[in-house]
Image (cartoon, rainbow, N blue to C red):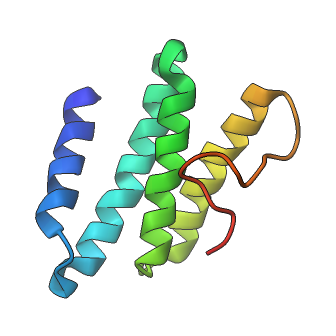
Amino acid sequence: LHQAADEYEAGIKQCGDNPEYVRTKSALLVQRSLLLLLLAHEEPDKRKAYLVDAAAQAQQAIALDHPKKDRAFEAKANALEDLAWMARRTTISPRIQGCSLQT
């Protein structure tokens, strides 16, 4: 999983800010977000960091106008839900570093 996460990250960096690769970059961001969610469940000691990063990656995809925006919102929601579960409450503060509840 770590190798896949690294490869997604490399692909995201390769896309840079090139408008020609916006769709590819947004798709890679969503896939990396989902992968980080898996890592969060595999490595409990790093769970919070993975989940915060997963939510931030999904938010970047949303900001890039992901072609299937529902997938980006679902990825973000999954990460925020798990963060809320960790905090043992039903809502989560928008002040969590790297996460914004706004689109």
> Does residue 23 appear left or right of residue 69 in this picture?
left
Q: Quadrant of the N terminus?
A: top left
Q: Quadrant of the C terminus?
A: bottom right
- Place residue 74 in its image quadrant: bottom right
> Does residue 42 appear left or right of residue 16 in this picture?
right
> Does residue 36 appear left or right of residue 55 in this picture?
left
Depicted 25 relative to depicted 77: above or below = below
Q: Position of residue 13 (x, y in %)?
A: 17, 58
Please report the residue visible at 40 percent of the width from the left and 78 percent of the height from the top: 64
Q: Position of residue 85 (x, y in %)?
A: 77, 31
Most foreground residue, 75 or 98: 98
Please report the residue visible at 47 percent of the width from the left and 16 percent of the height from the top: 43
Q: Position of residue 82 (x, y in %)?
A: 68, 36
Please report the residue visible at 43 percent of the width from the left and 28 percent of the height from the top: 39
Residue sitting farthest toward the right = 90
Please report the residue visible at 73 percent of the width from the left and 27 percent of the height from the top: 86
- Place residue 77 in its image quadrant: bottom right
Depicted 38 relative to depicted 100: above or below = above
Depicted 90 relative to depicted 29: above or below = above
Residue sitting farthest toward the left = 14
Q: Position of residue 40 (x, y in %)?
A: 50, 27
Depicted 37 relative to depicted 98: above or below = above
Count of all numbered marks drawn on residues in the image: 0
Residue sitting farthest toward the top = 45
> Does residue 99 appear left or right of residue 90 in this picture?
left
